[in-house]
Image (tube, rainbow, N blue to C red):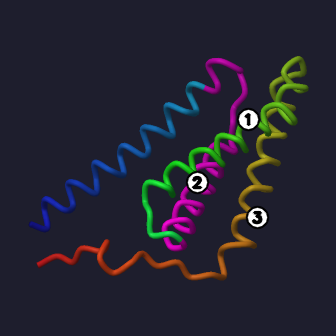
Amino acid sequence: MLAVDILIQGLIQGSIYALIALGLTLVYGLLRILHVAHASLFTLGGYLGVLVTNATGSLFLALVLAMLVVGFVGMASYRIIYRPLLSRPPLIALIASIGVFHCVRRSVSSNLWPIQHLLPNNTITKPD
């Protein structure tokens, strides 16, 4: 039974890595911007998902709300930060992306890190 759990966890983790890599490839292929802040947006979505799940108990609501908020933050950062920099050399957009990464990371960690978030007891499975 433990081998099946490890296999499932490995498939889930590999799928997350594949989604992040596909997102980076898509952004770079379309905009020619190396979007370093991509990972921090995934982290923001994860934190929002945990917060909403703990507050409401609804995983579906947490998924939908996290996707909408992260999508809005991504579109806003593109319109405000990246669009004016598309005509400039690519290094300037990379530096702006690193700045966005640090801003999102610091805002998430300073606001949410001190709070311990636990999943409800019925969602944790223990090996036999």
Q: Residues within 10 Å of mark 3 (few under 14, many from 20)?
A: some
Name the residue: 13% across, 59% down.
4
List the residue tagged with mark 1. 75
Name the residue: 57% across, 68% down.
51
| Percent position of residue 24, x then y | 58, 33
Q: Is residue 13 above or below residue 56?
A: above
Q: Main secondary structure of the magenta part?
A: helix
Q: Is residue 22 magenta?
A: no
Amino acid under disc 1: Met
User: Which of pointers 2 and 3 indicates the residue nearer the eye?
Assistant: 2
> In this orientation, which residue lies closer to the viewer: 11 or 61?
61
Mark 3–mark 1 distance (CA, rounded to whole Å): 20 Å
Element type at marker 1? helix
- Tell me which corner region of the image, top left, top right, bottom left or bottom right, holds residue 6: bottom left
List the residue tagged with mark 2. 45
Pointer 2 with pointer 1, Cβ within 8 A: no
Q: Residues within 10 Å of mark 1 (few under 14, many from 20)?
A: few
Name the residue: 43% across, 60% down.
59
Which quarter of the figure is the C terminus placed in? bottom left
> In this orientation, which residue lies closer to the viewer: 103 or 115?
115
List the residue tagged with mark 3. 106
Q: Which residues are magenta?
A: 27-55
Name the residue: 62% across, 19% down.
29
Amino acid under disc 3: Arg
> In this orientation, which residue lies closer to the viewer: 74 or 102?
74
User: Is residue 103 shown left or right of residue 128?
Assistant: right
Which mark is first along the chain, 3 or 2? Answer: 2
